[in-house]
């Protein structure tokens, strides 16, 4: 009888994910955070149990990163991740050789539960789904309720595994190549915080007040926020004067709504929205109209299909697929540096987060933030829950002039704003984050790299011996190993 091959032991990275392991480092983490603030202090032992309870149902989340001959790939990780108290600045680099080789971490601080994820694993919407299930199980344990999956759930427990299919490949169509502009945009500059630190500033507003302003202008919330941010950059950095480079926002677009996908892997496209300020007398209303028109054009389904076609076509070229990973790293880093110069900063709107009615009484709000670096010094994220919107700026600059100018713009339009942040942001209320001891960080991450090398050398001999034994006794399939390493 032919032995059935184990399913789900490894999988390819999706099309968008392939770039992140190549460019990630201690200085540019490519990590984002989604967090939930409860109305009672977090109990760490119960949070650990909740994490262990949901692990069997999120098998595609339980992976480690491995490098093949031509690409990275994910392999199942059967270890148990450990919940820890938050003790570092948000969105710190996740070392693929540390952290029990998991590509995510769960931390807590007072009433807040944090889920930090390496972007190669999934995007923000996927991470929110994981965090909601973790929170659901935690609250069940706190109440003393049995079982995570109830009998009336739509799917059986064995079927409730996160789908990690590559929706880019599923929705790929061979379309005419569209050339994308990489014209340099205006770059933000300022005084940097010490390496390893970061500034977080949250602005809390009422969604209904924001909607009233948007209705007055006849635009969506994202269009208004994008225009207000571009306007604030022009006013704060360029002093309202004409400039030879455009102010451009990098705007991630959720593709699930356009292509009916339920994948928990990455499935987003990025579009550039910007304006070249030639006329110093332009009014905000005129700028908003231009930004609104751009977004209507660039978020059309046809344009998004062209975006998918352009990105996937590169992956399908046989001569590019045959380039060894080492050379791909050099090439991808070079291209990424060029694209880095094509936008000023990132604005990501995750939309409305919803939970089950029985969980609302225990949850106060959600936050989302993206890691920053000196190459990408300032980013803005938005999410809403129960009528409140949280606009979060993460930055490596020592000042928060732009953030405050942006919130002042909202106030000018009649929107009340309450601010909160961590210690570097000099916000009034800072007890929502721990005070981090200042730690000397070796230049270029030498200490971290040295520790990784020790771990790798220590385990190499045992891994090789175990692998050879597996092939001899038949527990490992050499054909499966070839598919894994070479993506055949």
Image: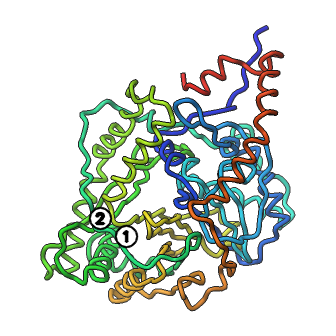
Name above or below for residue 471 compared with residue 417: above
Quadrant holding the N terminus: top right
Asked if residue 311 is positioned above or below residue 245 in the image, the reply reads above
Visible residue check, residue 132? no
Taking 363 as reference, is 7 above or below it? above
- Residue at 58 percent across and 40 percent down: it is 164
> What residue is shown with label 2?
248
Frontmost residue, 57 versus 356: 57
Residue 11: percent from left, percent from top: 61, 33
Residue 177 position within the rendered picture, expressed as x and y whole percent measured from the top left: 25, 36
Image position of 55 (left or right of 209):
right
Image location (x, y in percent) of residue 135: 71, 62
Element at label 2: strand
Mark 2 and mark 1 lie on one chain; the one further toward the N terminus is 1
Q: Which of 148 and 313 is in front in this view?
A: 313
Tell me, for residue 221, which label it has, or none: 1
Nearer mark to the viewer, of 2 and 1: 2
Report, in whole angstroms, how far the alpha carbon at label 2 lies from the one at label 1.
18 Å
Identity of the residue drawn at 54% across and 55% down: 125
């Amino acid at each position: 009888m032919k032995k059935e091959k184990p399913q789900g032991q490894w999988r390819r990275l999706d099309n968008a994910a392939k770039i992140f392991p190549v460019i990630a480092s201690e200085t540019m983490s490519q990590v984002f955070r989604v967090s939930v603030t409860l109305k009672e202090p977090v109990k760490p032992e119960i949070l650990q149990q909740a994490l262990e309870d949901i692990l069997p149902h999120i098998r595609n989340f339980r992976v480690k990163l491995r490098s093949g001959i031509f690409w990275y790939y994910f392999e199942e990780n059967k270890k148990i991740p450990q919940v820890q108290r938050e003790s570092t600045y948000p969105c710190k680099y996740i070392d693929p050789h540390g952290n029990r080789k998991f590509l995510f971490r769960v931390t807590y601080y007072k009433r807040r539960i944090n889920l930090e994820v390496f972007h190669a694993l999934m995007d923000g919407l996927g991470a929110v789904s994981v965090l909601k299930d973790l929170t659901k199980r935690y609250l069940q344990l706190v109440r003393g309720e049995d079982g995570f999956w109830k009998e009336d759930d739509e799917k059986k427990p064995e079927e409730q595994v996160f789908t990690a299919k590559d929706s880019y490949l599923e929705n790929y169509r061979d379309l005419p190549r569209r050339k994308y502009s990489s014209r340099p945009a205006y770059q933000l500059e300022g005084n940097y915080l010490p390496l390893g630190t970061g500034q977080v500033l949250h602005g809390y507003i009422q969604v209904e007040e924001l909607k009233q302003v948007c209705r007055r202008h006849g635009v969506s919330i994202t269009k208004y926020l994008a225009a207000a941010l571009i306007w604030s950059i022009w006013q704060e950095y360029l002093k309202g004067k004409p400039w030879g480079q455009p102010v451009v926002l990098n705007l991630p677009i959720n593709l699930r709504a356009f292509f009916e996908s339920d994948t928990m892997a990455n499935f987003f496209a990025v579009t550039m929205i910007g304006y070249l300020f030639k006329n110093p007398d332009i009014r905000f209303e005129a700028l908003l109209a231009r930004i609104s028109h751009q977004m209507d054009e660039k978020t059309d389904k046809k344009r998004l299909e062209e975006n998918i076609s352009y990105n996937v076509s590169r992956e399908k070229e046989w001569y590019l697929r045959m380039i060894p990973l080492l050379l791909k790293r050099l090439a991808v880093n070079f291209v990424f540096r060029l694209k880095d110069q094509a936008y000023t900063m990132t604005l990501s709107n995750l939309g409305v987060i919803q939970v089950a009615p029985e969980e609302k009484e225990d949850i106060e709000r959600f936050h989302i933030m993206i890691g920053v670096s000196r190459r990408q010094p300032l980013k803005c994220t938005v999410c809403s829950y129960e009528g409140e919107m949280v606009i979060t700026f993460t930055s490596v600059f020592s000042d928060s002039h732009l953030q405050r100018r942006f919130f002042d713009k909202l106030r000018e339009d009649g929107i009340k704003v309450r601010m909160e942040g961590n210690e570097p942001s000099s916000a009034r209320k800072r007890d929502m984050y721990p005070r981090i001891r200042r730690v000397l960080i070796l230049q270029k991450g030498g200490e971290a790299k040295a520790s990784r090398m020790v771990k790798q050398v220590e385990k190499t001999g045992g891994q090789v011996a175990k692998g050879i034994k597996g092939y001899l006794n038949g527990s490992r399939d050499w054909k499966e190993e070839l598919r894994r390493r070479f993506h055949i």
